[in-house]
Image: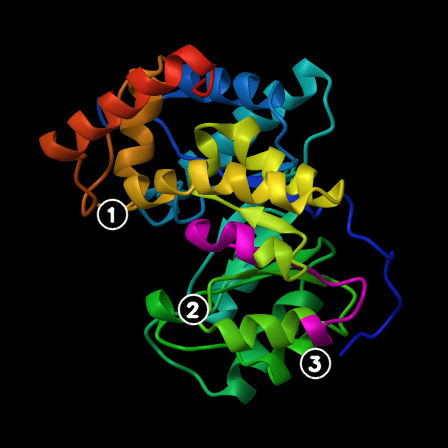
Amino acid sequence: MENATRDPSPPGLSGLWLPLITPFLEGALDEASTRRLIAHYLEEPVDGLILAATTGEGLTLDDAEVERLVAVSAGMVAEMGRALPLYLGLSGSDTRKLLKALARTADWPIEGYLIACPYYSRPSQAGLFQHFDALAEGCDKPIVIYNIPYRTGVNLENETLLRLAKHRNIVGLKDCCADATQSFELLRDRPKDFAVLTGEDALYYSALVQGADGGILASGHVMTADFAGIRTRLLEGDQPAALRDWQRLSPIPRLLFSEPSPAAVKYWLWRSGLIASPEVRLPMTPATEALAQKIDREIAQSVPSGLIP
């Protein structure tokens, strides 16, 4: 395993990152809405975007759609003139296929990858280590590992992760391990140049207080400045204010995840005029009428304070 020294801090791998939703219109990739979304978030305090990941319904996109999504997004970033890193979400249980995906996307205008642990096959820790080590050896871009055992069926243990963190191309973790002790011990024991971002929207404040570098939050699509502001207040040393803000903001993740994501986020963005349709692809289904009504009420309450897009 390559163990060369990497830069002390991966560029931009901190703060608020969005696992960007993928807009659809009449079953196809909605490029106009994608451009509108990118333009909007380039004006917001967002530190990076992840394309075609879980929230982006990446498993329902074909290769041509993913390539087009990246091209459209990168084109808008270049047009707007703001240096916003784009990472590509990848997942799968065949190391060889993922290596081919890394080779196929090597020249794409992305800064790195978010790669989930292999799902369903439930490899051993030795298998997980060899899987990610092979991927890191097979590309020249930084990799953020996505550990989410309640989706994949396997937990990447800290001992294994810390071994992987020695590789110069493995620069961070999206942490959804659902084990408070494991998360705390990782933040305590990680190398200084290894980033940890929580992927648990409801635990965002707690993760930041314990030392996480930020979050990859689907909820950050809405009330974006407020989510970013929690971390800003903590960095400024004003924890009481951050806690007050979080107490006010914390119902939003609960609302947006009350049904399978990203249906609720898409409905909110549609009602806010940022995307042309709240469409999702099967097996995801649209927000129910009951949830839609709750979101409409939340939007109506938020408009006066400028908290929605």
* Amino acid identity at mark 3: Arg
The reply to whether discs 1 and 2 touch (Cβ–Cβ < 8 Å) is no
The image's mark for residue 298 is none
Seen in the image, is 61 located left or right of residue 286? Answer: right
Q: Position of residue 184 (x, y in %)?
A: 60, 72
Instruction: Answer with the quarter of the image where residue 151 lies.
Output: bottom left
Helix, strand or loop at label 2? It is loop
Determine crowd level at label 3: few under 14, some 14-19, many 20+ residues with C-alpha closer than 10 A.
few
Over which residues does the magenta segment extend? 188-206
**Mark before the other along the chain sequence, 3 or 2:** 3
Q: What's the residue type where badge 2 is placed?
A: Ala
Q: Residues within 10 Å of mark 2 (few under 14, many from 20)?
A: some
Discs 3, 2 touching: Cβ within 8 Å: no
Viewer-side label of 3, 2: 2
Residue at 75% in and 79% down: 1
- Mark closest to the chain's N terminus, 1 or 3: 3
Residue 92 image offset from top left, x and y in percent: 42, 64
Q: Which residue is mark 1?
A: 260
Kind of residue at badge 1? Pro
- Residue 274 in view: no
Disc 3 element? helix
Indicate left or right for 109 with 52 as reference: right
Residue at image coords 62%, 44%: 240
Q: Is residue 27 above or below residue 97?
A: above
Q: Position of residue 99 (x, y in %)?
A: 56, 63
In this rendered view, identify the residue nearer to me: 123 or 137: 123
Residue 162 visible in this rendered orientation of the protein: yes
Q: Which mark is residue 163?
A: 3
Residue that badge 2 annotates: 178
